[in-house]
Image (tube, helix red, strand yellow):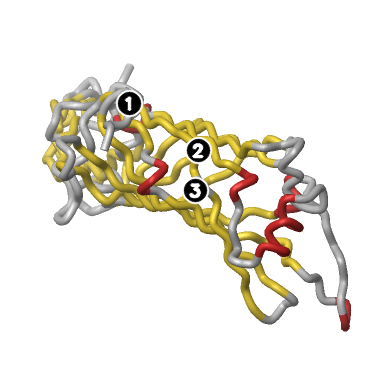
Amino acid sequence: MSGLTGRVRSAEGWAVENAVLTVTDLAGKQTARVDADVRGAVATEPLPPGVYTAVVTAAGYLPVARTAQIAGDGTGSIGEITLAAEDGAVELPPAGPWVIDPAHSSVLVTARHLGISSIKARLPLRSGRIDVARPVEQSSVRAEIDAAGIDSGIAMRDDHLRSPDFLDVDTYPLIEFVSTGLTRQGGDRWSLRGELTLHGQRRQVELELQYGGYGPDPWGGVRAAFHARAELRRDDFAINYNAMVRAGVAMIGTAVKVELDIQAVQGEQLPEL
């Protein structure tokens, strides 16, 4: 038998999965704490009869408090709770397909050089697609990056980065990402998990994702903007070039920072500009 039950929805009517219901008695003592399921439903164990305070919270939403009455059989209901987005929250993009625009997107990679400075290189996005779902946590992302297009501004260094010492682009021409999960962290910030295939190795990665909003573009389309970042270890992808210089300092550091600025166009294909 359940105790206090309810259902949590967004203002748009979608279930808010992982919303948290916290129940306290009149003395302020916590008596229950449960997470909402995929349908937005919450249910505690049976509670002693009496009056309680029920507070519903979720990342990116304003909290809601209700007074709850528990009957003699230990049950009660707070009904349907509608959560409003936090102030300043950006409206989510409409559901459906969005095509990543390579011409207006970029991938920037930064690595330590000789232990004292950083080198930066850009990689071109070849293609990508975002399928926005409802609830938005069920959305998916796929992207392909052209490894051979790496550009650090120095041709000799770029040739070395393309060689078997590093990316080995003749054998592994593409870097691929396929998402496996999306979780809201609060406001316009999300955690995007997925599988990254690089240098023949497939690894789970997590990106910090910031959503910038959506709106019309000058060409009659609708665009959405995203910024993402992650830190990778090149040895996780079998890129183990470890040429050493004086004092035993590696030429290229093991940790690599990746930043992505993405524009996506609503629809199944990019417009002809």
Quarter of the picture containing the C terminus is: top left
Q: Which quadrant holds residue 177?
A: top right
Q: The residue under label 1 is which amino acid type? A: Gln
Q: Could you say which is closer to the camera, residue 50 or residue 31?
A: 31
Mark 2 element type: strand
Cα separation, mark 2 vs mark 1, equals: 14 Å
Q: The residue under label 2 is which amino acid type? A: Arg
Q: Is residue 217 at all visible to an observer of this figure?
A: yes
Report which residue position mark 1 lands on.
269
Mark 1 element type: loop
The relative height of residue 29 versus residue 95 in the rendered view (above or below) is below
Report which residue position mark 3 lands on.
207
Report which residue position mark 2 lands on.
126
Q: Name the residue at 59% across, 58% down.
A: 151
Residue 32 location (% of width, % of height): 33, 39
**Image mark count:** 3
Q: Earlier in the sequence, mark 1 or mark 3?
A: 3
66 left or right, relative to 181: left
